[in-house]
Amino acid sequence: MRTNEAILKRIEEICEEKGKNICNVCLNGGKSPSALYDLMKGRTKCPKVTTIKSFCEGAGITLSEFFDRDYFNDLEDDD
C-alpha cells in the first residue's frame, strides 16, 4: 500500500467510526475539505501534515491516533 492509499483508508475508517463525512470533519477542524478531495481524486499524491492534523482536530483525535495502524509501518515507496 502506498502512503496516500493508507491515509485515505484511515480517513475513511475514522469517518465511519465517527458517523461523519469528510466534509463535516474537515470543517470542524477549521479547514476546507478540498485538499482531501484532491487526494481522493489523485490530484495530490500526499497531503501536508497540517491537513491531516486539521482533519484529526475535526474528528477529535490526535495525530498519534490517526497513524496508529499497522499498515502505516509497511508502506511501499512513493515514486
Image (cartoon, rainbow, N blue to C red):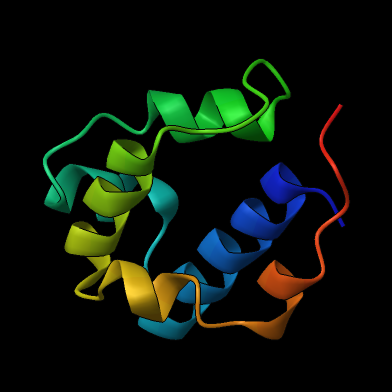
Residue found farthest to the top: 43
Total numbered circles: 0
Q: Is residue 49 left or right of residue 78?
A: left
Q: Position of residue 34 (x, y in %)?
A: 41, 24
Q: Is residue 4 left or right of residue 20?
A: right
Q: Position of residue 2 (x, y in %)?
A: 82, 48
Residue sitting at x 75%, y 50%: 5
Q: Position of residue 75 (x, y in %)?
A: 80, 59
Query: Taking 76 as reference, is 17 above or below it?
Result: below
In depth, the one of 29 and 19 nearer the eye is 29
In depth, the one of 3 and 38 nearer the eye is 3
Q: Is residue 60 left or right of residue 79?
A: left
In depth, the one of 24 and 6 nearer the eye is 6
Q: Position of residue 1 (x, y in %)?
A: 87, 57
Residue sitting at x 45%, y 68%: 15
Residue sitting at x 28%, y 39%: 50
Residue 19 visible in rendering: no
What is the quadrant of residue 19 in the picture?
bottom left
Q: Quadrant of the C terminus?
A: top right
Query: Taking 2 as reference, is 47 above or below it?
Result: above
What is the quadrant of residue 35 in the picture?
top left
What is the quadrant of residue 74 in the picture?
bottom right
Residue 75 visible in rendering: yes
Residue sitting at x 38%, y 80%: 65
Query: Taking 29 as reference, is 79 above or below it?
Result: above
